[in-house]
Amino acid sequence: MQILTPRVLEALERFNSAHPWDHNAHYHPWLLRRLPRRFDRALDVGCGSGDLARLLASRAREVHGIDSDREIVQRARESTPPRAPVTFAVTDASDRLPPGPYDVITCAAVLHHLPLSETLAAFRQRLAAGGTLVVIGLAREETLVERLLGSVSIPLNAATGWVKNRGRTASRPVSMTAVTRVPGATFAEIVREARRILPGARIRRRLFWRYTLVWRA
């Protein structure tokens, strides 16, 4: 029996549009728990409106956020207190990354926009000894397990949106207004490349169409 019929999916999509929430920010507390209490330098790749970069700044001496979208970088600058140890730059991460080294590198919902192998290798080269890389990523669904996780995420997504927007007028988070790309690599392909380039990387499937990757140099 097909539970998630096209009519059900359409209804859930309408509900989610009226009760939006940021799937990436949902994982920010989890991400911070993977990092040291204090560290020196951090790089946030695909920083968007700067929410994660500002969180990192509560622990870091300096944080560099980069994004290819000039308008959203300007918004990140305007939303950041003048004395916060954060700088933002318009940089296409597919062409080059700041030289580093960095004690922490984060990348939330951006890796699928970039060449997978080359970007993972660039992260490895720029991470300081003992540093931590954390990726929150998207992969193309391929297996039955991934489709089941996606199906479970749909009603949970709607329920979370209702709870987060209860009692107030909903507005789409800035990060949800950015142009998105359908992931090209499957989870299996990402695991294979990550383990080749980042030996010992811990990679897990997650709810809400995400996977996580943690690697310590």
Image (cartoon, rainbow, N blue to C red):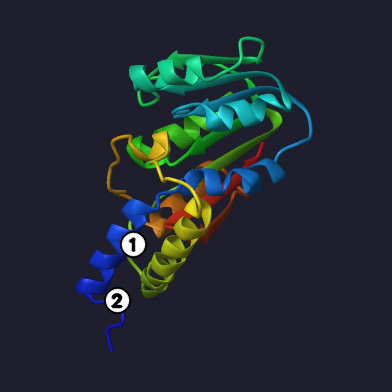
In the rendered view, would you say 190 is above or below 12?
above
Q: Is mark 1 on a helix, strand or loop?
A: loop
Q: Name which of mark 1 and mark 2 comes first in the sequence.
A: 2
Mark 1–mark 2 Cα distance, whole angstroms, equals 16 Å
Q: Nearer the viewer, residue 58 or 80?
A: 80
Q: In this view, does 32 lie to the left or right of 94?
A: right
Task: Give the label on residue 4, or none.
Answer: 2
Could you tell me residue 93's position as x and y percent? 40, 24
Residue at the far left: name it. 6
Residue 36 vs 73, above or below: the answer is below
Q: How crowded is mark 2: few (under 14 residues within 10 Å), some or many (20 or more)?
A: some
Tell me the quarter of the picture where residue 81 sits: top right
Residue at left offset 66%, top offset 15%: 85
- Residue type at mark 1 is Glu
Q: What element carries label 2?
A: loop
Q: Going by the picture, which residue comes out furthest to the bottom?
A: 1
Q: Quadrant of residue 71?
A: top left
Looking at the picture, tell me which residue is in the foreground, 170 or 145. Answer: 170
Query: Farthest top residue?
Result: 82
Name the image quarter holding residue 37. Answer: top right
Give the labeled residue for mark 1. Answer: 141
Is residue 104 visible in the rendered image? The answer is: no
* Residue sitting at x 28%, y 42%: 181
Q: What residue type is labelled 2?
A: Leu
Using the image as rendered, state which of residue 125 and residue 64 is in the foreground. 64
Position of the N terminus, as image quadrant, is bottom left
